[in-house]
Image: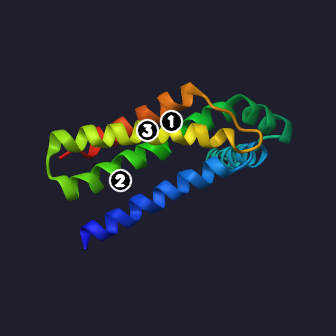
Amino acid sequence: MKKVAISILFIVWLLVIFLFSNQNGVSSKQLSRQVLDKIISISSYVTNQSISPEKKEQIIKKYHPIIRKIAHFTIYFILGILVYLAVYLYKKNKKWTIWISVVFCIIYACSDEFHQILSVGRTFKVKDILIDTLGSLFGILLIKK
């Protein structure tokens, strides 16, 4: 049952990454702006400080690129965990599980960036592959048994 559940989660997560990459540039930027807008709203509420629309826009412009990179890292952090668990459940060899997981995540990050070229307004960035790889490595190292 574990194998099936982890395998399904793994496949669903690959699909989630694919769908994010399939968004056009405008939709992708809009989504990350919405996330940042929510973070600012929650911060404003928690600190009981109102933020003017102009100030909010300044904050969004300043931190938007950072939020996008954090999203890359986080999405691949989760992928690293899921791919490690999926491979470990079938392989049961720690050394090979780590290597297979790392190589898979790097290949998927590369293919993900190539996929983005096919989406209007999206580009291929080596920096994103590096961030994705770091995220997956952190996930793999966190979960390794």
CA gap, disc 1 to disc 2?
18 Å
Task: Say whether residue 61 is left or right of residue 20.
Answer: right
Tell me the crowding category of disc 3: few under 14, some 14 to 19, or many 20 or more residues within 10 angstroms, Cα based: few
Res. 37 mark: none
Give the residue type that dot 3 points to: Ile
> Reading the chain from its start, which is encountered first: label 1 or label 2?
2
Question: Residue 84: x percent and y percent?
Answer: 29, 48
Residues at circles 1 and 2 in contact by the CB criterion of under 8 Å? no
Question: Residue 9: x percent and y percent?
Answer: 40, 63
Of badges 1 and 2, the one in the foreground is 1
Question: As rendered, which of 37 and 46 lies closer to the eye?
Answer: 37
Which quadrant of the structure image shows residue 51?
Answer: top right
Secondary structure beneath label 2: helix
Question: Residue 13: x percent and y percent?
Answer: 47, 57
CA gap, disc 3 to disc 1?
5 Å
So how many labels did they put on this image?
3
Q: Mark 2 highlights which residue?
A: 82
Residues at circles 3 and 2 in contact by the CB criterion of under 8 Å? no
Residues at circles 3 and 1 in contact by the CB criterion of under 8 Å? yes
Q: Mark 3 highlights which residue?
A: 107
Q: In the displayed image of the protein, which residue is found farthest to the left? A: 93
Secondary structure beneath label 1: helix
Give the residue type that dot 1 points to: Cys
